Protein backbone atom coordinates (compact mmCIF):
# COMPACT_ATOMS: atom_id res chain seq x y z
CA UNK A 1 0.00 0.00 0.00
CA UNK A 2 1.14 3.54 -0.76
CA UNK A 3 -0.43 6.51 0.91
CA UNK A 4 -0.22 9.99 -0.56
CA UNK A 5 -0.98 13.11 1.47
CA UNK A 6 -1.43 16.33 -0.48
CA UNK A 7 0.17 19.33 1.22
CA UNK A 8 -0.25 21.84 -1.58
CA UNK A 9 -2.44 21.56 -4.69
CA UNK A 10 -2.35 25.01 -6.30
CA UNK A 11 -0.76 25.92 -9.63
CA UNK A 12 1.92 28.64 -9.85
CA UNK A 13 0.65 30.85 -7.00
CA UNK A 14 -1.15 29.95 -3.79
CA UNK A 15 -4.86 30.57 -3.34
CA UNK A 16 -6.88 31.06 -0.17
CA UNK A 17 -7.61 27.33 -0.03
CA UNK A 18 -4.60 25.79 -1.73
CA UNK A 19 -0.89 25.91 -0.99
CA UNK A 20 1.89 25.41 -3.53
CA UNK A 21 2.87 22.01 -4.85
CA UNK A 22 3.97 19.41 -2.34
CA UNK A 23 2.89 15.92 -1.31
CA UNK A 24 4.19 13.12 0.84
CA UNK A 25 4.20 9.49 -0.28
CA UNK A 26 4.31 7.00 2.58
CA UNK A 27 5.16 3.31 2.42
CA UNK A 28 5.77 1.58 5.77
CA UNK A 29 8.60 3.52 7.42
CA UNK A 30 9.55 5.28 4.18
CA UNK A 31 8.44 8.81 3.42
CA UNK A 32 9.10 10.76 0.26
CA UNK A 33 8.35 14.45 -0.02
CA UNK A 34 7.58 15.18 -3.68
CA UNK A 35 8.27 18.84 -4.45
CA UNK A 36 8.44 21.54 -1.84
CA UNK A 37 6.63 24.72 -2.86
CA UNK A 38 6.73 27.84 -0.70
CA UNK A 39 4.93 27.31 2.61
CA UNK A 40 5.36 23.53 2.65
CA UNK A 41 6.82 23.42 6.17
CA UNK A 42 3.66 24.94 7.62
CA UNK A 43 1.54 22.46 5.69
CA UNK A 44 3.66 19.62 7.11
CA UNK A 45 2.93 20.88 10.62
CA UNK A 46 -0.75 21.38 9.94
CA UNK A 47 -1.11 17.93 8.40
CA UNK A 48 0.19 16.35 11.59
CA UNK A 49 2.86 14.50 9.60
CA UNK A 50 5.78 16.20 11.32
CA UNK A 51 9.37 16.31 10.08
CA UNK A 52 10.48 12.90 11.34
CA UNK A 53 11.93 10.62 8.67
CA UNK A 54 11.10 13.24 6.07
CA UNK A 55 14.59 13.00 4.69
CA UNK A 56 14.05 12.14 1.04
CA UNK A 57 12.81 14.84 -1.31
CA UNK A 58 11.99 14.05 -4.94
CA UNK A 59 11.82 17.10 -7.19
CA UNK A 60 9.78 16.98 -10.40
CA UNK A 61 11.39 20.09 -11.93
CA UNK A 62 13.05 23.35 -11.01
CA UNK A 63 10.21 25.89 -11.33
CA UNK A 64 9.93 28.11 -8.29
CA UNK A 65 6.43 26.98 -7.29
CA UNK A 66 7.93 23.52 -6.68
CA UNK A 67 11.20 24.32 -4.89
CA UNK A 68 11.07 27.59 -2.94
CA UNK A 69 9.86 25.85 0.22
CA UNK A 70 13.22 24.09 0.53
CA UNK A 71 14.73 27.40 1.68
CA UNK A 72 12.29 27.78 4.56
CA UNK A 73 12.55 24.13 5.50
CA UNK A 74 16.35 24.35 5.67
CA UNK A 75 16.15 27.57 7.64
CA UNK A 76 13.96 25.86 10.25
CA UNK A 77 16.26 22.86 10.40
CA UNK A 78 19.17 25.26 11.08
CA UNK A 79 17.47 26.58 14.19
CA UNK A 80 15.12 24.06 15.75
CA UNK A 81 14.21 20.82 14.14
CA UNK A 82 16.82 18.15 13.63
CA UNK A 83 17.16 15.38 11.14
CA UNK A 84 20.38 13.49 10.44
CA UNK A 85 20.26 13.48 6.71
CA UNK A 86 18.44 15.19 3.85
CA UNK A 87 18.65 13.85 0.31
CA UNK A 88 17.21 15.92 -2.53
CA UNK A 89 16.76 14.06 -5.80
CA UNK A 90 16.16 15.80 -9.10
CA UNK A 91 17.34 16.52 -12.63
CA UNK A 92 20.50 18.60 -13.11
CA UNK A 93 18.70 21.83 -13.99
CA UNK A 94 16.49 21.67 -10.90
CA UNK A 95 19.44 20.78 -8.68
CA UNK A 96 21.51 23.72 -10.01
CA UNK A 97 18.73 26.09 -9.01
CA UNK A 98 18.25 24.38 -5.64
CA UNK A 99 22.02 24.58 -5.06
CA UNK A 100 21.92 28.35 -5.64
CA UNK A 101 18.91 28.71 -3.33
CA UNK A 102 20.39 26.67 -0.50
CA UNK A 103 24.07 27.56 -0.69
CA UNK A 104 23.74 31.09 -2.13
CA UNK A 105 20.79 32.37 -0.09
CA UNK A 106 20.13 30.17 2.95
CA UNK A 107 23.57 28.96 4.03
CA UNK A 108 25.95 31.61 2.58
CA UNK A 109 29.03 29.82 3.85
CA UNK A 110 27.42 28.21 6.90
CA UNK A 111 27.51 24.46 7.27
CA UNK A 112 24.30 22.59 6.39
CA UNK A 113 22.48 21.56 9.59
CA UNK A 114 22.57 17.90 8.52
CA UNK A 115 24.26 15.64 6.03
CA UNK A 116 22.81 17.28 2.91
CA UNK A 117 23.01 15.53 -0.45
CA UNK A 118 21.83 16.80 -3.81
CA UNK A 119 21.47 13.67 -5.92
CA UNK A 120 21.24 14.01 -9.69
CA UNK A 121 18.92 11.47 -11.23
CA UNK A 122 18.51 10.05 -14.69
CA UNK A 123 15.58 8.02 -16.00
CA UNK A 124 15.53 4.59 -14.35
CA UNK A 125 15.30 3.02 -10.90
CA UNK A 126 16.29 5.36 -8.08
CA UNK A 127 15.22 3.23 -5.09
CA UNK A 128 15.15 -0.55 -4.91
CA UNK A 129 14.02 -1.59 -1.43
CA UNK A 130 12.93 -4.98 -0.09
CA UNK A 131 9.34 -4.72 -1.21
CA UNK A 132 9.07 -1.71 -3.50
CA UNK A 133 10.88 0.35 -6.11
CA UNK A 134 10.77 3.97 -7.23
CA UNK A 135 11.56 4.71 -10.87
CA UNK A 136 12.10 8.12 -12.45
CA UNK A 137 10.83 8.76 -15.97
CA UNK A 138 11.29 11.79 -18.24
CA UNK A 139 8.44 14.29 -18.54
CA UNK A 140 8.11 17.05 -21.13
CA UNK A 141 7.56 20.52 -19.62
CA UNK A 142 9.26 23.90 -19.97
CA UNK A 143 12.98 23.45 -19.39
CA UNK A 144 15.11 20.29 -19.38
CA UNK A 145 15.38 17.43 -16.87
CA UNK A 146 11.77 17.12 -15.68
CA UNK A 147 10.81 13.81 -14.09
CA UNK A 148 7.81 11.80 -12.98
CA UNK A 149 8.01 9.04 -10.39
CA UNK A 150 6.58 5.54 -10.47
CA UNK A 151 6.10 3.75 -7.13
CA UNK A 152 5.70 -0.01 -7.44
CA UNK A 153 5.31 -2.71 -4.83
CA UNK A 154 7.14 -5.87 -5.76
CA UNK A 155 5.23 -9.02 -6.57
CA UNK A 156 5.10 -11.18 -3.46
CA UNK A 157 3.85 -14.51 -2.25
CA UNK A 158 1.81 -14.20 0.95
CA UNK A 159 2.72 -16.30 4.00
CA UNK A 160 -0.05 -18.77 4.86
CA UNK A 161 -0.20 -19.08 8.68
CA UNK A 162 -2.61 -22.02 8.47
CA UNK A 163 -0.11 -24.09 6.50
CA UNK A 164 2.59 -23.14 8.99
CA UNK A 165 0.37 -24.34 11.85
CA UNK A 166 -0.34 -27.62 10.06
CA UNK A 167 3.40 -28.17 9.69
CA UNK A 168 3.96 -27.15 13.34
CA UNK A 169 6.53 -24.50 12.43
CA UNK A 170 7.25 -22.51 15.57
CA UNK A 171 7.01 -18.70 15.37
CA UNK A 172 10.27 -16.79 15.04
CA UNK A 173 13.16 -16.65 12.61
CA UNK A 174 12.14 -19.82 10.72
CA UNK A 175 8.98 -18.18 9.47
CA UNK A 176 10.88 -15.06 8.45
CA UNK A 177 13.38 -17.11 6.45
CA UNK A 178 10.56 -18.93 4.67
CA UNK A 179 8.92 -15.60 3.77
CA UNK A 180 12.28 -14.52 2.34
CA UNK A 181 12.39 -17.62 0.15
CA UNK A 182 14.86 -19.70 2.18
CA UNK A 183 14.40 -23.37 3.07
CA UNK A 184 14.80 -24.08 6.79
CA UNK A 185 15.72 -27.00 9.01
CA UNK A 186 13.64 -27.23 12.18
CA UNK A 187 15.11 -28.38 15.53
CA UNK A 188 13.42 -31.76 14.98
CA UNK A 189 15.39 -32.20 11.75
CA UNK A 190 12.55 -31.64 9.26
CA UNK A 191 13.39 -29.52 6.22
CA UNK A 192 10.63 -27.11 5.11
CA UNK A 193 10.67 -25.34 1.75
CA UNK A 194 9.06 -21.91 1.07
CA UNK A 195 6.62 -23.50 -1.41
CA UNK A 196 5.01 -25.37 1.49
CA UNK A 197 3.90 -22.20 3.30
CA UNK A 198 3.65 -19.47 0.63
CA UNK A 199 0.59 -18.74 -1.50
CA UNK A 200 0.62 -17.89 -5.19
CA UNK A 201 2.24 -14.70 -6.49
CA UNK A 202 0.34 -11.46 -5.95
CA UNK A 203 1.27 -8.40 -7.99
CA UNK A 204 1.81 -5.26 -5.90
CA UNK A 205 0.11 -1.91 -6.35
CA UNK A 206 1.48 0.84 -8.58
CA UNK A 207 1.16 4.58 -8.37
CA UNK A 208 2.53 7.20 -10.78
CA UNK A 209 3.15 10.83 -9.91
CA UNK A 210 3.58 13.35 -12.72
CA UNK A 211 4.26 17.00 -11.90
CA UNK A 212 3.94 19.77 -14.48
CA UNK A 213 3.70 18.35 -17.99
CA UNK A 214 2.70 19.56 -21.44
CA UNK A 215 2.52 16.32 -23.42
CA UNK A 216 0.95 12.99 -22.65
CA UNK A 217 1.84 10.79 -25.65
CA UNK A 218 5.14 9.67 -24.13
CA UNK A 219 3.45 8.77 -20.83
CA UNK A 220 0.82 6.34 -22.09
CA UNK A 221 3.15 3.35 -21.83
CA UNK A 222 4.83 4.48 -18.60
CA UNK A 223 1.63 4.86 -16.56
CA UNK A 224 -0.20 1.97 -18.25
CA UNK A 225 -2.55 0.24 -15.85
CA UNK A 226 -1.39 1.94 -12.63
CA UNK A 227 -3.77 1.81 -9.67
CA UNK A 228 -3.55 5.58 -9.30
CA UNK A 229 -2.22 8.32 -11.55
CA UNK A 230 -1.51 11.63 -9.83
CA UNK A 231 -1.07 14.39 -12.41
CA UNK A 232 -1.44 18.11 -12.95
CA UNK A 233 -4.50 19.76 -14.50
CA UNK A 234 -3.60 23.45 -14.62
CA UNK A 235 -6.09 24.52 -17.29
CA UNK A 236 -9.51 23.71 -18.67
CA UNK A 237 -10.36 23.16 -22.33
CA UNK A 238 -11.59 26.76 -22.79
CA UNK A 239 -7.95 27.83 -22.35
CA UNK A 240 -6.24 25.00 -24.17
CA UNK A 241 -4.07 27.53 -26.06
CA UNK A 242 -2.59 28.73 -22.79
CA UNK A 243 -2.06 25.15 -21.69
CA UNK A 244 -0.11 24.58 -24.91
CA UNK A 245 1.86 27.77 -24.59
CA UNK A 246 3.00 27.08 -21.01
CA UNK A 247 3.37 23.30 -21.44
CA UNK A 248 0.60 22.31 -19.05
CA UNK A 249 -2.44 20.05 -19.37
CA UNK A 250 -6.15 20.70 -19.36
CA UNK A 251 -8.33 18.54 -17.12
CA UNK A 252 -9.68 16.81 -20.23
CA UNK A 253 -6.19 16.01 -21.52
CA UNK A 254 -5.21 14.51 -18.15
CA UNK A 255 -8.39 12.43 -18.18
CA UNK A 256 -7.74 11.32 -21.76
CA UNK A 257 -4.30 10.05 -20.69
CA UNK A 258 -5.94 8.13 -17.83
CA UNK A 259 -8.41 6.56 -20.26
CA UNK A 260 -5.77 5.78 -22.93
CA UNK A 261 -3.50 4.07 -20.40
CA UNK A 262 -6.32 2.24 -18.63
CA UNK A 263 -5.31 3.48 -15.22
CA UNK A 264 -7.65 2.58 -12.37
CA UNK A 265 -7.98 6.00 -10.71
CA UNK A 266 -6.99 9.56 -11.54
CA UNK A 267 -6.15 12.27 -8.99
CA UNK A 268 -5.74 15.79 -10.34
CA UNK A 269 -3.63 18.45 -8.65
CA UNK A 270 -1.82 21.75 -9.54
CA UNK A 271 -5.23 23.41 -9.87
CA UNK A 272 -5.47 27.02 -11.02
CA UNK A 273 -7.37 29.47 -8.84
CA UNK A 274 -9.15 30.79 -11.94
CA UNK A 275 -11.49 27.78 -12.02
CA UNK A 276 -14.08 26.25 -9.74
CA UNK A 277 -13.08 22.81 -8.52
CA UNK A 278 -16.36 21.25 -9.56
CA UNK A 279 -15.91 22.48 -13.14
CA UNK A 280 -12.44 20.92 -13.32
CA UNK A 281 -13.84 17.67 -11.93
CA UNK A 282 -16.78 17.64 -14.36
CA UNK A 283 -14.52 18.21 -17.38
CA UNK A 284 -12.29 15.30 -16.38
CA UNK A 285 -15.09 12.96 -15.34
CA UNK A 286 -16.79 13.36 -18.72
CA UNK A 287 -13.81 11.45 -20.13
CA UNK A 288 -12.65 9.41 -17.12
CA UNK A 289 -15.28 8.96 -14.38
CA UNK A 290 -12.90 7.59 -11.74
CA UNK A 291 -11.39 11.03 -11.10
CA UNK A 292 -10.73 12.99 -7.92
CA UNK A 293 -9.54 16.58 -7.61
CA UNK A 294 -7.13 16.73 -4.67
CA UNK A 295 -7.45 19.38 -1.98
CA UNK A 296 -4.76 20.34 0.51
CA UNK A 297 -4.60 17.70 3.28
CA UNK A 298 -6.51 15.10 1.29
CA UNK A 299 -4.96 11.66 1.69
CA UNK A 300 -5.44 8.63 -0.52
CA UNK A 301 -4.62 5.02 0.29
CA UNK A 302 -3.64 3.15 -2.84
CA UNK A 303 -3.83 -0.61 -2.99
CA UNK A 304 -4.18 -3.05 -5.86
CA UNK A 305 -7.27 -1.83 -7.76
CA UNK A 306 -8.15 0.65 -5.00
CA UNK A 307 -7.71 4.34 -4.31
CA UNK A 308 -9.53 5.35 -1.16
CA UNK A 309 -9.75 8.92 0.04
CA UNK A 310 -9.21 9.18 3.79
CA UNK A 311 -9.40 11.96 6.29
CA UNK A 312 -5.88 12.77 7.35
CA UNK A 313 -5.46 13.74 10.98
CA UNK A 314 -5.02 17.46 10.89
CA UNK A 315 -3.57 19.21 13.91
CA UNK A 316 -6.40 20.99 15.64
CA UNK A 317 -5.65 24.69 15.65
CA UNK A 318 -4.83 26.22 19.00
CA UNK A 319 -8.02 27.68 20.38
CA UNK A 320 -6.27 30.86 21.56
ZN1 LIG B 1 4.08 24.27 -11.31
ZN1 LIG C 1 6.46 24.08 -13.98
Image (cartoon, rainbow, N blue to C red):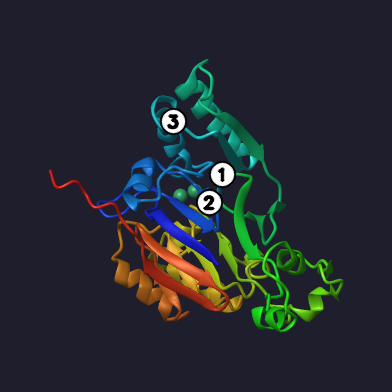
128 left or right of 143 in image: right
Note whether 96 is above or below 2 in the view shown: above
Residue that mark 3 sits on: 77
The residue located at (45%, 24%) in the rendering is 106
**x then y, percent, for residue 78:** 44, 25
Residue reaching furthest left? Answer: 320
Query: Is ligand 1 closer than 8 angstroms to the Cβ of mark 3?
Result: no
Mark 3 is surrounded, within 10 Å at the Cα level, by few (under 14), some (14 to 19) or many (20 or more) other residues, namely some
**x then y, percent, for residue 113:** 50, 25
Does residue 253 show up?
no
Task: Say which of 273 and 320 sits in front.
Answer: 320
Note whether 153 is above or below 32 in the view shown: below
Going from N to C along the chain, the mark reached first, 3 or 2, is 2
Q: How many marks?
A: 3
Going from N to C along the chain, the mark reached first, 1 or 3, is 1
Does residue 272 show up?
yes
Q: Are marks 2 and 1 in contact (CB under 8 Å)?
A: yes
19 left or right of 130 in image: left
Give residue 203's quadrant in the image.
Answer: bottom right
Mark 2 is surrounded, within 10 Å at the Cα level, by few (under 14), some (14 to 19) or many (20 or more) other residues, namely some
Q: For mark 2, give the secondary structure.
A: strand
Residue that mark 1 sits on: 56
**x then y, percent, for residue 206:** 61, 68
Amino acid sequence: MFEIVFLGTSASAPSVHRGLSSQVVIHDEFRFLIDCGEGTQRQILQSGLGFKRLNRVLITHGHLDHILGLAGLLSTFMRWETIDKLEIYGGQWALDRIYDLIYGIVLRGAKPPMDLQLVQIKAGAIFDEDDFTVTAFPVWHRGPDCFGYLFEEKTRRPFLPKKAEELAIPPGPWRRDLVNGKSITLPDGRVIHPNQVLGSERPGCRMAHVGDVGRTDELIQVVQDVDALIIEATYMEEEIDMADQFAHLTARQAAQLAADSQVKHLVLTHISRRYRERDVLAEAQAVFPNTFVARDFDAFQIRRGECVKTEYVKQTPNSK
